[in-house]
Amino acid sequence: MAAGTAQETQNFVTLKGSVELIVDFFNYSLNSILYQRGVFPEESFIPTQHYGLTMYMSKMPEIKKYTDEILPHLKKWLTEGKIKKLVLALCDVNSKEPLECWEFRILAEETPTGEIKQQGTKPLKDIQQEIRNVLRQITACVTFLPLLDCVCSFDLQVHTKKDTQGEGWGDVQPLSIQNAQEVQLRSFSTSIQNVHTFVSYKSV
Amino acid sequence: MAQFSIENRMRAITMNLSEVNLMSSKKENQISKNDQSTKLGKSLCNGSINMSLNCSTNSQSVATKTPKRTETSFSNKTPKMTQGPTLGKPNSWKSPGMGGGAIRKAQNILGDRMVPSRSTTDFEAAHHKMTSEDPSGDRVLSYQTVQIPKPQEAYINHQKALYSASSSTQKKPSTRFIPNTADRVLDAPAMMNDYYLNLLDWSQTNFISVALDKQVYLWNAASGDIQELMECEGDDNYISSVQFTQDGSYLAIGLNTGCVELWDIQQQRRLRTMAGHAARVGVLAWNEHVLSSGSRSGLIFHHDVRIPQHLVASLEGHTQEVCSLKWSGDHRFLASGGNDNLVHVWEGTSGQITRNTPLHVFNQHQAAVKGMAWCPWQNRLLATGGGTNDRSIKLWNMNIGDCVDTIDTKSQVSGIFWNSEYQEIISSHGFPNHTLQIWKYPTKAKVAELTGHDERILHLAMSPGETAVMSAGADETLRLWNCFQTDPNKKKGIAGRRNEPRSALDAMSNFR
């Protein structure tokens, strides 16, 4: 792999940095969605500053434990280029029916030889700006998404390539919403991986 | 019959492809559209080919119908709703494969038995589908070691406030009389229903300027006379902001083209046009002869209106549309709020421009910040209100540089004003309640809720004596509320002075 000059390597992300950015973005999105959509009580979140935004992070120990355990797996798989998409579904606790799905499709930019790029070509500042815009849009989605008028919980599904191994993970049926209406939000690119965000919900 | 054709004509497999496709397409039209499973069962081996074709055509139509957002530098924050092909209908309603027209066309050009028509077959897509990775090989994984927590059964979604139009906060009975209906209702036809504009202002000389699409009207609040001040030119041009100078003798008008015009009220003529912004000017603020303008591009310009080269400074802070700009009473600070949910505070002095770097950046709002007002009796106190997703008024202390208090209003905040006499805050609201609310400061108790507007309130202006407010709603009405009338029995001396129209000098002496 052709690494850039010293100057470039300072300013541009590497594959590792790109993965970190995406996992961070995912973590903040997950918490933000849980807060903004009112899945958990407002009091169980604390405001934190990140990307120059106020993000609400859950302080429930169960959620922290969950994210702490899954994020390293996601990091590993992203580095290996195994993940195709992450689906965060908000489901009715009683009927288990998915009411809203947040999809993060991840597309790795491959070199001509079909490998994952190791070195990006985009300054960190630009990437963070793009991420900030997506996070703002996630917040703004509340204005058109229908109210989740029942006790809800979330479920996370990772769509991966066939040869993915991970301890503690099991195969499940993919969730889908009947009569879904899908809205695409902004995308961002680390110049190594692209993340496209979608939200789909039951159209009434 | 599909099987038959494939068994018997193995040599001409490509030919069959198109015929098979045709046959099953015809069949689909006959069978009930919901009954896809039986059709798939019958066509067995060609099913996969056919399905792949169907998939490819369907996914193409998805791709074209839901175009990817092209990101411009000042596109809206709220994602645009694009209607997918499945809106309101079950997936199976959409008949797969080609439309009826294509089939009929194919039948007509069926010529030689050995040279098949391939017009209905998208070979490129089929090839792509057959050679690209089989999606069924993917795994869908879920982490099963840690149980995902559930909220308690009795928990009620806090977002419900957005969807239920009833206001839940208890009103505190007021010690004074506040009329709960509007004193006057004026028609404002063609008022633009845009939250990010500022189309209403009330001058110290008791004129109300209101912009209705292309025209600016002046309403004399004392006599009730209405006159048209100007009409802007250009097909897709419209007025995006109006703002009187502090003494009320000039009016600055921001346009969709990015120009700012300066008008003399007395002579009713245009004094100058100041270009500069690349996008519409949604908000204006005066600091003596310095006019600050905020644009959709996120830039704030300072114009010195006395000199030919009017553009004296630009402030780069916001990344999205600036929708509020207010100078503090002593002109020490300029506060700006934007669609990027940020509040910036810039340090300045009277009649001067501000520094280029913000003194404070507040990012606690969860939506665009439009309502904004400096406290008249505490110079370092700023109140800002957030949009639909935020619904709160936040109070900021400039000395501490942090939020000191928050009022949950349960509605989108579109305008805020302070009243010195009663030490109250009045705020106008949009979705979902469309009301005006009056809050006691600093107890945050709700004093009154004024209803009347049928749709969201977009703009709010306060009279020079702080006795009344005017609200402009998306229901194309202007409503005048006499909600801060002075009590004639109380504080007679002050009240008498307050009712007189103030001179510009008085206004200046009040800013202390």
Image (tube, coloured by chain):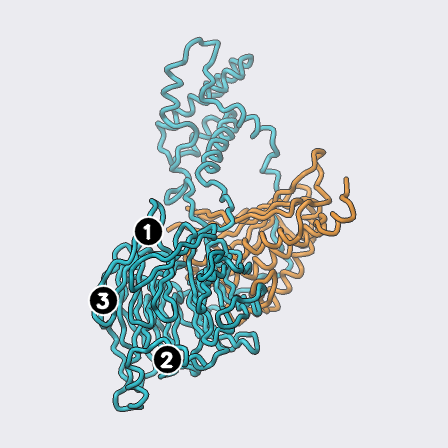
C-alpha span from label 3 to label 2: 30 Å
Check chain identity for marks 1 and 2: say if they share one: yes
Is B405 located above or below residue A119 in the figure? below
Q: Secondary structure at mark 1?
A: loop
The answer to whether one can see residue B156 in this image is: no
Which chain shows up in cyan? B
Chain A drawn colour: orange
Q: Looking at this view, name the residue that lies furthest to the right.
A: A6
Q: Residue at x 48, y 79 (%)?
A: B379
Identify the residue position indicated by label 2 in the image.
Answer: B506
Is A100 located above or below residue B155 in the figure? above
Name which residue type carries label 1.
Answer: Cys
Name which residue type carries label 3.
Answer: Val
A106 with respect to B2 (left or right): right
Check chain identity for marks 1 and 3: say if they share one: yes
Q: Secondary structure at mark 3?
A: strand
Check chain identity for marks 3 and 2: say if they share one: yes
Q: Which chain letter matches label 3? A: B
Contact, mark 1 vs mark 3 (Cβ under 8 Å): no
C-alpha span from label 1 to label 2: 34 Å
Q: Residues within 10 Å of mark 2 (few under 14, many from 20)?
A: few
Identify the residue position indicated by label 1 in the image.
Answer: B232
Q: Give the percent coordinates (x, y) of residue B247.
A: 36, 71
Residue A14 versus residue A176: which sits nearer the camera? Answer: A14
Q: Give the percent coordinates (x, y) of residue A113.
A: 72, 34
Identify the residue position indicated by label 3 in the image.
Answer: B185
The answer to whether one can see residue B285 in this image is: yes
Comparing labels 3 and 2, the label whose residue is closer to the camera: 2
Ranked by sequence position, the earlier of labels 1 and 3 is 3
Ranked by sequence position, the earlier of labels 1 and 2 is 1
Q: Residues within 10 Å of mark 1 (few under 14, many from 20)?
A: some
